[in-house]
Image: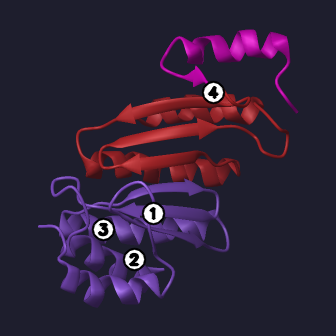
Chain colours: A red, B purple
Amino acid sequence: MILTENQRNALLRPLLGSGWTLAQDRDALTRSYVFEDFVAAFGFMVRVALAAEKMNHHPEWTNVYRTVHVTLTTHDAGGLTLKDAELARRMDALA
Amino acid sequence: MILTENQRNALLRPLLGSGWTLAQDRDALTRSYVFEDFVAAFGFMVRVALAAEKMNHHPEWTNVYRTVHVTLTTHDAGGLTLKDAELARRMDALA
């Protein structure tokens, strides 16, 4: 279920204050992470992949050498849900 | 060093015949792979990551659930080199 206004205020505000931004073209969160090198960037992706598979909720993400650009949204719901806020928090903790 | 015309004929032709295409906007190879699910797609990425790190040549790639879209080029050389042709072949073998 799409986040309500109250949920957006409570859950998205801290994320938007810590590096996440709202996508321009759809109801989604985006963030870029920059690591020391490819091994560090891909190591992060492996940790996130395990968490994402466990949540059954997966990021859209692009890796170019030491950068990882992430977009989170819930396709089935057509926008941001609790799962996106939770995955964003977990990704920050794993970065 | 950028591939010569002779090298392009010899090395790129088989790749272009097996699913790779030349990018429109720069001298690069692109290909999309579709797997059964996220675990299969990310498992492929892990195998490629190990090979890429060993080659010291890394793909630009995007993963959305069970799809992986890849772009190969050599930034230092400003276009396609032997390393791109080699990584393309290895990715096909690992897919």
Q: Disc 1 to disc 2, how far (Cα)?
A: 10 Å
Instruction: Locate residue B34 relative to residue B29 in the image: left or right.
Output: right
Q: CA distance from mark 1 to mark 3?
A: 16 Å
The answer to whether dots 1 and 3 both sit on one chain is yes
Q: Are marks 3 and 2 in contact (CB under 8 Å)?
A: no
Label 2 resides on the chain identified as: B
Q: Are marks 2 and 4 on the same chain?
A: no
> The disc numbered 1 marks a residue on which chain?
B
Amino acid type assigned to the residue bearing label 3 in the image = Leu
Q: Are marks 1 and 3 in contact (CB under 8 Å)?
A: no
> Bounds of the magenta span?
A1-22
Please give the chain letter of the residue carrying mark 4: A
Disc 2 to disc 4, C-alpha distance: 31 Å
Q: CA distance from mark 3 to mark 2?
A: 11 Å
Amino acid residing under circle 2: Met
Foreground of the two, A55 or B56: B56
Residue occupied by mark 2? B91
- Check if residue A7 falls in the magenta segment: yes
Residue depicted at 20% across the width and 86% down the height: B6
Quickly name the residue at label 1: B70
